[in-house]
Image (tube, rainbow, N blue to C red):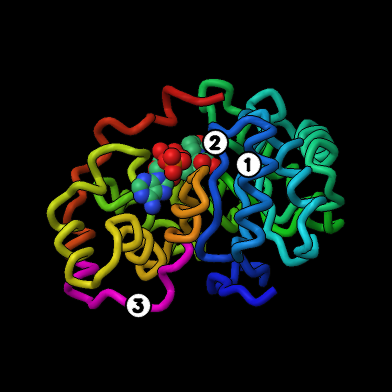
Amino acid sequence: MNVELAPVVTLRNGAKMPLLGLGTWPMENAEAAEVVETALDMGYRLIDTAENYGNEPGVGTAIKRSAVPREEIFVTTKFNKQWHSYDGVEEAFEASARRLGVEYIDLLMVHWPVPEQDRYVDAVAGMAKLLADGRIRAIGVSNFKPTHLRRLFDSGLVPEVNQIQLDPLHTRPDIVALHREHGIVTEAWGPLGRGGALLQDPTITALAEKHGRTPAQIVLRWHTLVGNVAIPKSSHPDRLAENLAIFDFVLGREELDALSALNAGDEGLLDADIFGH
Ligand code: NDP
């Protein structure tokens, strides 16, 4: 098998994470099994799932069926608020690992901080023992805002990755600056704008025309050049291939800045102080 792989970013603890991966929400198990296997064949090596998506078994089926060795795949999943405690995290890990049929998980994430419950600091602390004994390769959080991250820092905890909703219309500069300061990798969910108006934006379509690429490729190249890991979801083989085929061209500084300047702020995004599971 001779496929082009995405470049990797080295996390603070030395683990290597592909810059581009596959999102699997809202695939059901049968679809996830098929699409993830296709994606692995094409060269995807980062797969994103979650307890909450209900498709970890399907993702696991694909990993088992695939000719790609387990250790070449970066498997990421997330757990719900009921496991936000020092010991609960271990149960969450065991349940996800069993559903996925894997011995270890590359990146385990607190899916949402759920501040009203106020137990996310314990959850991150609990992941340290999973990291120490090799059951996970990196500690992650998701949808954490600066206030939530600072609570972790105050307890001496720094996750390797924070997966947040981010695209050129929502560049989240306050969170990204804090990530940079602490060596946290920014992983973008909804990187293509979740099927919204993003891919019709005139700045993006003009760059697509100029480079002979699709709008999705321009947006994904922007993510990976400004330092984000991106996990676009597609269930279609042609789009899976399109979304991965971005590492043979670059955007210039001014082009990247023009895309970043599309930022319209956080309005309309899910607010992790209110929403979460
Ligand atoms: P995306 O920005 O990845 O957009 C997905 C949509 O874009 C789908 O409708 C897909 O349709 C379409 N699409 C994919 N590729 C192309 C293309 N090349 N051209 C045009 N349209 C395209 O949004 P998601 O919300 O799916 O986010 C990605 C992943 O992030 C999720 O799958 C999930 O793994 C994760 N996520 C994490 C959350 C969190 O709380 N941490 C919350 C939500 C998502 P089609 O499938 O038909 O190709």
Instruction: Tell me the kind of residue under disc 2.
Output: Trp
> Quick check: is 220 in the magenta stretch?
no
SS type, badge 3: loop
Q: Which residue is mark 2?
A: 25
Residue 247: image location, x then y, percent = 43, 74
Which disc number belongs to residue 259? none
For label 1, the crowd category at 10 Å Cα-Cα, with few meaning under 14, some 14 to 19 and many 20 or more, is: many
Residue 61: image location, x then y, percent = 78, 43
Task: Give the mark nearer the N terminus: 2 vs 1.
Answer: 2
Residue 224: image location, x then y, percent = 41, 66
> Quick check: is 250 in the magenta stretch?
yes
Q: Which residue is mark 1?
A: 49
Residue drawn at point x = 61 percent, y = 73 percent:
3
| Range shown magenta | 244-257
Ligand 1 within 8 A of label 2's CB? yes
Ligand 1 within 8 A of label 1's CB? yes
Task: Give the mark nearer the N terminus: 1 vs 3.
Answer: 1
Residue drawn at point x = 43 percent, y = 60 percent:
242
Question: Where is ligand 1, by quadrant?
Answer: top left
Labels 1, 3: front one: 3
Q: Which residue is mark 3?
A: 249
Instruction: Tell me the kind of residue under disc 3.
Output: Phe
State the separation of the CA atoms marked 1 and 3. Answer: 29 Å
Residue drawn at point x = 44 percent, y = 31 percent:
272
Asked if the residue under mark 1 is in contact with the one under mark 2, i.e. CB atoms within 8 Å, the reply is yes
Q: Is residue 204 visible?
A: yes
State the separation of the CA atoms marked 3 and 2. Answer: 28 Å
